[in-house]
């Protein structure tokens, strides 16, 4: 058995643990970018080593804008993880994605305003390609894992990330629909972009909790309603993670493992030593 965890699950609202994780150990990980949201729990699930991180902290005390996304992704990378599945609550911006459904989106629109979006500062510039922001291979495996649970699941759609923590106004919600957005949430950006910079495969298992506020025949979204739907779907998410772990393909045929190969533009001779040290985990194989 590989002792290094190869799959991580970042749990969002409503998912704060993975039942059935054998021999779990909580690891406190420090990073050059500060502390992650909390300890990373590592254990064995279906024969492979799996890590779990509660995005909002244990007890859900971090708002979407307060999460240290850089530290979270860097900490997972430092443990040797190669694949990250984000479990995220979201609102639906289309009729056919109903509350209680799960969605595996394939596109992302960043509408946040005040978040750190890149590891690459301090005189080292990288222009990462995110034309396809979610790993196609891992997304397909997540979709198949959710299908195996029997819950209604959709493949594809554009996930819009807003700043939060408030919910949308009805005017905003209708504008997002007019743009062709499918789902709305508060945490997928910049998480997906940082995962790509760290050369991790990243996919989202999105739980539809409501119709946002555009659907006039539905009550406006509330925290109580979100939690009610999340509780209903928690077992589906946990079962899907078990299916994914049991059938995870170890090879990575996607472009994620070499995402930085053509992204670094700075002359290595002008990169400060402290920047090299801070980003060593990400760039050492490219900076000789």
Image (cartoon, rainbow, N blue to C red):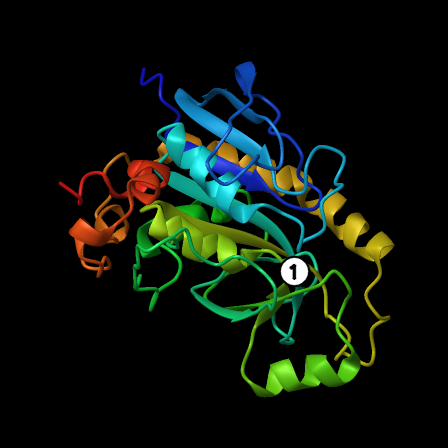
Can the viewer see residue 153?
no
Can the viewer see residue 224?
yes
Q: Nearer the viewer, residue 254 or 239?
A: 254
Secondary structure found at label 1: strand
Q: Residue at x 47, y 44 (%)?
A: 85
Q: Quadrant of the N terminus?
A: top left
Q: Is residue 111 above or below residue 206?
A: below
Q: Residue furthest top?
A: 23
Q: Quadrant of residue 34?
A: top right
List x then y, in percent, for residue 5: 39, 25
Q: Quadrant of residue 186?
A: bottom right
Q: Is residue 79 above or below residue 62?
A: above
Left or right of 221 on screen, residue 189: left
Q: Quadrant of residue 47?
A: top left
Q: Residue at x 65, y 69 (%)?
A: 92
| Label 1 CA crowd tier, 10 Å (few <14, some 14–19, many 20+) | many
List x then y, in percent, for residue 276: 29, 41
Report the residue marked by disc 1.
Answer: 90
List x then y, in percent, for residue 139: 40, 52
Q: Is residue 51 above or below residue 84?
A: above
Q: Nearer the viewer, residue 179 or 286?
A: 286
Q: Residue at x 74, y 60 (%)?
A: 165
Q: Nearer the viewer, residue 235 or 269?
A: 269
List x then y, in percent, for residue 38: 62, 31
């Amino acid at each position: 058995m590989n002792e290094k965890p190869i799959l991580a699950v970042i749990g969002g609202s409503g998912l704060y643990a993975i039942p059935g994780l054998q021999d779990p150990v909580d690891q406190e990980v420090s990073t050059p970018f500060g502390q992650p949201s909390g300890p990373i729990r590592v254990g064995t699930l279906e024969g492979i080593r799996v890590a779990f991180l509660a995005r909002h902290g244990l007890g859900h005390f971090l708002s979407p804008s307060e999460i240290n996304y850089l530290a979270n992704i860097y900490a997972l990378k430092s443990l040797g993880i190669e694949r990250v599945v984000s479990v995220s609550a979201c609102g639906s911006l289309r009729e056919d994605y109903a509350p209680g459904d799960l969605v595996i989106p394939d596109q992302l629109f960043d509408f946040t305003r005040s978040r750190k979006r890149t590891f690459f500062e301090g005189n080292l510039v990288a222009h990462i390609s995110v034309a396809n922001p979610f790993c196609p291979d891992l997304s397909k495996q997540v979709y198949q894992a959710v299908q195996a649970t029997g819950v209604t699941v959709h493949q594809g759609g554009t996930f819009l990330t807003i700043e939060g923590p408030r919910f949308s106004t009805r005017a905003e919600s209708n504008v997002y629909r007019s743009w062709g957005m499918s789902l709305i949430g508060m945490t997928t950006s910049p998480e997906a972009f940082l995962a790509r910079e760290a050369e991790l495969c990243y996919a989202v298992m999105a739980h539809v909790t409501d119709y946002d506020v555009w659907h006039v025949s539905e009550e406006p979204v509330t925290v109580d309603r979100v939690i009610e739907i999340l509780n209903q779907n928690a077992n589906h998410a946990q079962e899907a993670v078990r299916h994914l772990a049991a059938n995870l393909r170890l090879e990575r045929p996607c472009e994620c493992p070499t995402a930085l190969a053509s992204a670094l533009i700075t002359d290595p001779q002008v990169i400060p030593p402290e920047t090299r040290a801070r980003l060593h985990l990400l760039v050492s194989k490219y900076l000789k």
